[in-house]
Amino acid sequence: MNEFCAGARIQLRLFRRNPGHLLVFTTIPFFSAIFLSSLNAADRTDLAPYAVIAPTLMALWLVSLDLAGSVIDDDREEGMLELFTASPANLSLMLTGRVLVVSAAGLLAFAEAALTARMFFGIPLPTAHPWHILATLAATVLTTAGTATVMAGAFVTARSAKQFANALGYPFYVLGGVLVPVTFLPLWIRPVSWFIYLYWSADLLRSSTDPAPVEDFGARLGALCLLGGVSFGLGILVVNRFVCRARAHGITGTE
């Protein structure tokens, strides 16, 4: 746990030193306002949860891609990666602590979106099943951390992967049903959504804000956690292989 806690402390200090890393959260009220304004114009304020959930998951995805996924690559550019690699500490545990801090910070987006709906549009977020909402948010944070670990491994082993990170945003928003449920997508592409954690998270959050009983909550939450576990395992595997190669050959680049 020493490496895990050290990684968390490092990331918190980096946030204090460079608050610009958190600029993504300044966009959440604007996205929420756009979605809520569209629903108001269509006289569909009953769909307000969609306008709160969408920017939350968008922020979490951006955080996992842009910030948490780049922690190792950024360390390499700043000359810190060599120190981490040369130390006997477990880099994977340190990485876990860092990406979890970043992913947990993504929950600020949920509070921002809900406050925007309440303060500027007078629309409170329904919380018919609060414990379901909390459980889903917690599982989403953990799964986001797992996804970020995969991204970190991809970025550190193949620098070209980082160049395509921004292009992964909107396709995953659509396939994950972040704002519009995947039932509106063509039948042939819907199975792809089952392998995207945003789909399970968005579906569970929408169901948890509905007064009707949440069907198959355990199975759906399990699918979300499974995707997170698989992503985390793959990410750790890639990072460990990179560390072993760096320690054996003294190379922290992609040469």
Image: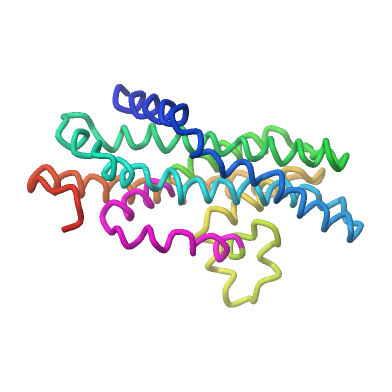
Could you tell me which residue is drawn at 33 percent across and 24 percent down?
6
The picture places residue 49, in percent across and down from the top left corner, at 76, 47
The picture places residue 24, in percent across and down from the top left corner, at 57, 44
Instruction: Indicate yes or no whether the magenta region holds residue 160.
Output: yes
Could you tell me which residue is drawn at 33 percent across and 51 percent down?
234
- Count of labels in the image: 0
Q: Magenta segment range?
A: 147-173
From the image, which quarter does the N terminus lie in? top left
Could you tell me which residue is drawn at 56 percent across and 41 percent down?
23
Nearer the observer, 82 or 79: 79
Nearer the observer, 48 or 119: 119
From the image, which quarter does the C terminus lie in? bottom left
**Left or right of 31: which side holds 42?**
right
The picture places residue 95, in percent across and down from the top left corner, at 34, 37
- Picture quarter containing residue 128? top right
Q: Is residue 99 above or below residue 54?
A: above
**Left or right of 120: which side holds 182?**
left
The picture places residue 221, in percent across and down from the top left corner, at 57, 45
Q: Main secondary structure of the magenta part?
A: helix
Taking the view exactly as shown, the residue that stands out farthest to the left is 249
**Left or right of 78: which side holds 176?**
right
- Picture quarter containing residue 97? top left
Instruction: Indicate yes or no whether the magenta region holds residue 159.
Output: yes
Q: Is residue 33 above or below residue 109?
A: below
Could you tell me which residue is drawn at 59 percent across and 36 percent down?
107
**Left or right of 105: which side holds 146?**
left
